Image (tube, rainbow, N blue to C red):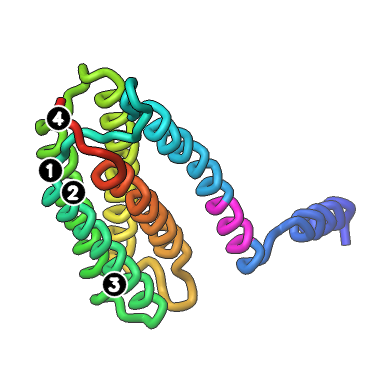
Amino acid sequence: MSVTAVEHHEAHDEHGAFELTPAQRLRNNRLGLWLFMFSEVFLFGGIFMARFYLWRDPATGAVVRPALDQFLGLGTTSVLLVSSLFMAIAETAIAHGNRRRFLNSILVTAALGTLFLVGVVGLEWSGEVSPGDGAFGAIFFGMTGLHAFHVLTGIILLLFVWNRGRHGDFSAENHWGVEAAAIYWHFVDVVWVFFYPALYLIGEAVHL
């Protein structure tokens, strides 16, 4: 064997020694995603705590909230929770090799997410609270706007996953992209589970 061939063989062995197995890559991907989710907790947690600090009656110190549309709040929350159900169905379907159910459920999830945005951004933002309403406006638009941005990015991610699945990507053995999208979508839904009572239920309702 020539010196060049030996050097090439050694270089190949050295490269292979650092190559991760599919199981290791999957474990690292999951760790990276969960670390990202953990950082998001601080982002949402900060504005969540600001709501209870700033939405208080200056005279009594009691926790207050703007008189938002309760039916709209309950309706948008219900839509988002149902979307999580379809996301779970999509992930389970691809895990069992049912591509048609996976694709259909992903589309339903994205459609319900879009309907949620229409309710919050399209209707609620034109309701009781305006951006000029001091602390009420800052917190309301901060909480709903930050969450709506994450829902929008989630919808884009879902459509990207759907398009890849439509072209034959993902299988029962290899569907990390679907799992990642599901984790992100469920996280966004859980955040709203905390935001909904903070915005619509906790504290005395006041008209601005």
Label 2 Cα neighbours within 10 Å, binned few <14 / some 14-19 / many ≥20: some
The quarter in which the N terminus is drawn is bottom right
Spatial CA distance of label 4 from label 2 is 16 Å
The quarter in which the C terminus is drawn is top left
Q: Nearer the viewer, mark 4 or mark 2?
A: 4
Q: Amino acid at mark 3?
A: Phe
Whether residues under marks 4 and 2 lie with C-beta atoms below 8 angstroms apart, the answer is no
Could you say whether the residue bearing mark 3 is in a helix, strand or loop? Answer: helix
Disc number placed over residue 73 in the picture, else none? 2
Quadrant location of residue 204? top left
Q: Amino acid at mark 2?
A: Gly
Residue ID for mark 1: 69
Residue ID for mark 3: 102
Whether residues under marks 2 and 1 lie with C-beta atoms below 8 angstroms apart, the answer is yes
Q: Amino acid at mark 1?
A: Asp
Could you say whether the residue bearing mark 2 is in a helix, strand or loop? Answer: helix
- Whole-percent x, y for residue 47 in the image: 42, 33
* Residue positioned most to the front: 60
Q: Is residue 78 left or right of residue 56?
A: left
Disc on the earlier residue, 3 or 4: 3
Label 4 Cα neighbours within 10 Å, binned few <14 / some 14-19 / many ≥20: few
Whether residues under marks 3 and 1 lie with C-beta atoms below 8 angstroms apart, the answer is no
